[in-house]
Amino acid sequence: MKILVLGSGAREHAIILALRAEQERHEILCAPGNAGIARHATLVEVDPMNGSAVRAFADEHGVDLVVIGPEAPLVAGVADVVRGHGIPVFGPGRAAAQLEGSKAFAKRIMEAASVPTGRAMRASSAAEVDAAFDALGAPYVVKADGLAAGKGVIVTDDRAAALAHAEHYLPHGPVLIEEFLTGPEVSLFFLSDGDTVRALSPAQDFKRAFDGDEGPNTGGMGAYSPLPWLAEQFGSEAAFVDEVTRTVAMPVVKQLDAEGTPFIGLLYAGLILTPAGVRVIEFNARFGDPETQVVLPRLRTPLSRLLLAAATGTLEDQPQPVFTDDVAITVVLASEGYPEAPQTGRPIGGLAEAAAVEGVGIVHAATAAPDAPEGDLIATGGRVLNVVATGSDFADARARAYEAIGRIRLDGAHHRTDIAARVAE
Ligand code: AMP
Ligand code: GLY
C-alpha cells in the first residue's frame, strides 16, 4: 500500500515503525515528519493542516490511505476534505473530532449515550465557577473547553489557584468544573469505522513532569503496556476491555453515528478506575502519545490492515487484534524547561550507542537534521526522543530502557526515573 502519514512526533514515528514491521512492504510518506521518521519514510512537503493540499497530493501520488496523527488537522476538518474526495482516511471528520476538541461536546455525547463519567458543571463567570466549587467540593478540577495541549486542566486543593485557572480561560468561553475522581488511570484505544470497534491493548501514561507524579501536567513523560494489575480487579485484561467496549466505546460510536457524524479513526478513552467503577475523564480523537509507542510494538496483527478496514467501513470483517505477551515501556527525554519553556536547538549525541542496547528502539518526537552533513541532530521541541524497550518482564525492560536513555547526550535534558517502577516490583 501507499500510505501517507500526517504529523511530526513520536506517535507518527511509532505508527510508521509498526507499518514497517509488517511482512508486506509499504510505500510510506510522511508530512512533515522529523529526522528520525526520515529513516523509515519519505518526507514530503504538504501542509498537514491544509485539507485541499493533502487531497491534491494524495490524488496526484495515488495514495491508498491517509493516516492523520495529531488532533489539530482533525479538528480543522482535513479528514472531511480528503474523504470527501473518495480517498480512505484514518481519522475522524471535524464534527466527530469535537469529542477531543470540546470538553463540553464530549460531556454532552457521554450524557446522551449514558457513558459513566464524573459529574461536571459548566461555568461562564467567576461567580458560576465559585458556585460549582461549592457544589462539587475539593479537590477542584477545572477544564478549559478547547484544545490546550495538556495545559487546559488543573487539579488542585488550592481554591484560589483553581479559580485563577478558570479565570484565565473564561474570556475564551465557558469552562467545565468536574467532580474529582480517584484511582489508577488507563488509556484504552479503539479503532472505529463509524459502526464497529476493535480495541487495542491498554496502556498507562505518566502525565506529570517529575518523579512521583510531581510537577505540571505534560503531554506524557512515559508509558507502559500491558497492565497486569487489571486482572486483579476485572479477572482478566479481556474482561476489562469488554466492559469498556460495551459501556463506553460502542455507545459513543453509536451516538455519533446517530447524529450523522460517524467516528472513523482512533477513539482514545482516558479512564479512571474509581472505587465506584470505570469513569471516562476524557476522549481523544487520535492515537495517544506516548502510549502508542508501547501499544504498537506489541501488536501482531498488521496495523495497515486495521487502519484501512476502519477507513473503509469494513472493521467487522477483521478479527480482534492480537498482541504478544511481551511488555513494553517507553521513557520520554524532554528538553530543559519542558513543559513551561523548552530550550530547543541543542545538539543530540549518543543515539547509536542507545539504540545498541538489546531490545531497545529510539523513537523521535522533535528532532531535525543539522545543516552540516556531519553534524549532530538537534532537538526542536519539548519532548525530543522516546526510548522504547520491550522484553519478557517489566524489571528487565525498565533496566534496558534506562541503560539506553543514559547513553543519550542532550544538555539540560530531563526524564522521569520511575516509569513502570511500581509494576516492575
Ligand atoms: P484530561 O486532559 O482531561 O485528560 O486531564 C489531564 C489529567 O488531569 C488527567 O490525566 C488526570 O490525571 C487529571 N484529571 C482530569 N480530570 C480529572 C478528574 N475529574 N479527577 C481527577 N483527576 C482528573
Ligand atoms: N498521552 C496523552 C495524550 O496523548 O493525550
Image (cartoon, rainbow, N blue to C red):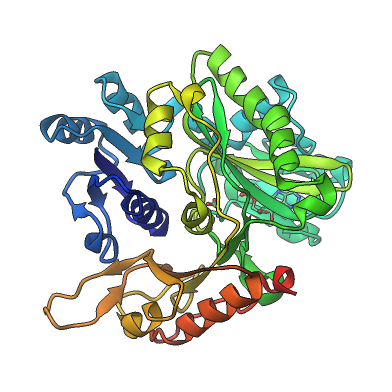
Which residue corresponds to the image point at 46% horizontal and 79% vertical from the top-left? 336
- Of residues 386 and 2, which is closer to you in this image? 2
Whether residue 280 is visible: no
Counting from the top left corner in percent of width and height, residue 68 is at 36, 40
Which residue corresponds to the image point at 47% horizontal and 23% vertical from the top-left? 317
Which residue corresponds to the image point at 46% horizontal and 81% vertical from the top-left? 404
Counting from the top left corner in percent of width and height, residue 141 is at 74, 50
Number of numbered tags placed on the structure image: 0
Of all residues shown, which one is farthest toward the front? 23
Q: Quadrant of residue 151?
A: bottom right
Instruction: State left or right for residue 130 relative to residue 34.
Output: right
Q: Quadrant of the N terminus?
A: top left
Residue 218, placed above or below residue 373: above
Counting from the top left corner in percent of width and height, residue 22 is at 35, 49
Counting from the top left corner in percent of width and height, residue 121 is at 75, 35
Instruction: State left or right for residue 15 relative to residue 401.
Output: left
- Of residues 121 and 187, which is closer to you in this image? 187
Q: Quadrant of the C terminus?
A: bottom right
Whether residue 300 is visible: yes
Residue 115, placed above or below residue 366: above
Residue 402, placed above or below residue 165: below
Instruction: State left or right for residue 245 relative to residue 360.
Output: right
Instruction: State left or right for residue 210 relative to residue 306.
Output: right
Which residue corresponds to the image point at 30% horizontal and 45% vertical from the top-left? 5
Q: Quadrant of residue 419?
A: bottom right
Q: Quadrant of residue 59?
A: top left
